[in-house]
Amino acid sequence: YLGFLLGAFCLFRGVEGLLFADEGESSLPCVKSGLLALLTAAMLVLGTEPFLLTPPAPSEFQLKLTVPVLSNITDPASLTHTAPTFSMDISTLLTIGFFALLQIGMYLFCLAKMREIDRQPGPSLLKLRLMENEENLFDGGLYIGIAGTATALVLQVLGVIQPNLLAAYSSNLFGICCVALVKIRHVRPYKRRLILDGQVETSKPTLASV
């Protein structure tokens, strides 16, 4: 399990280093790779060790409680007791893993687009306009999440796949997490830096003319 975590962490750190070698972020440089590595390692562990999700064997020691009722039941034999199950089949795990990989790919694509804009020549205000033009792209994780949930629900209604709301709504959850991470962790600080740099650039001609 530790090997899964270390391997995923090294992989994401390598990809991040190739895409953002000179980004110069000083606050929590390993948080992004750590979160992605933890998610990927958890999916690998759940996929390779399905017994972790199976319920334990019933114990031979059982506790029985008798609770008094206010009225008599006419037909007690008609009542059935269904034990709750917490197991997940392989198809559900594969579906959740597929949705998670889609959002990881969308996350890396958004970071690559930001890096492409940052490397373009031009003033900071121009880069700020380009960032505003890519707002729909930065919301793409949410669109993919909603589309994945809708597709999974339709396939469940048609009987193509087994009904499982956890697998369907996991796509929407991953999409929300992806968009929140991109916009709060990356887009907002980068736009703030562009705004400050733009103010400095616009004030330089004024100072030179004075």
Image (cartoon, rainbow, N blue to C red):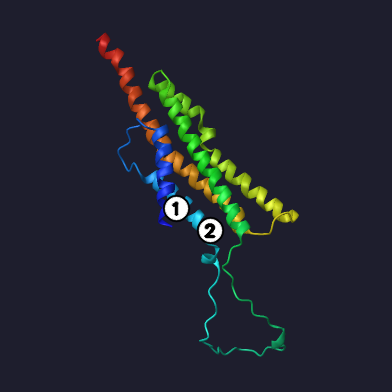
- Mark 2 is on which residue type? Thr
Q: In this rendering, is residue 174 above or below 18?
A: below
The residues tagged by marks 2 and 1 sit, at their Cα atoms, a distance apart of 11 Å
The three-letter code of the residue at mark 1 reads Phe
* Observer able to see residue 144: yes
- Residue that protrudes farthest toward the right in the picture: 158
Asked which quadrant contains residue 191, the reply is: top left
Looking at the image, the residue that sits furthest to the top is: 209
Q: Nearer the viewer, residue 183 or 82?
A: 82
State left or right for residue 196 relative to residue 60. Answer: left
Q: What is the crowding at mark 2: few (fewer than 14 residues within 10 Å), some, or many (at least 20)?
A: few
Q: Nearer the viewer, residue 87 or 80?
A: 87
Q: Quadrant where the C terminus lies?
A: top left
Q: Which residue is mark 2?
A: 48
Disc nearer the start of the sequence (2/1): 1
Which residue is found at the position 73% from the left and 54% from the top?
Answer: 160
**Residue under the image location 60 percent in, 46 percent down:** 146
Residue at mark 1:
4
How far across and how far down the image is residue 7, in percent?
42, 48
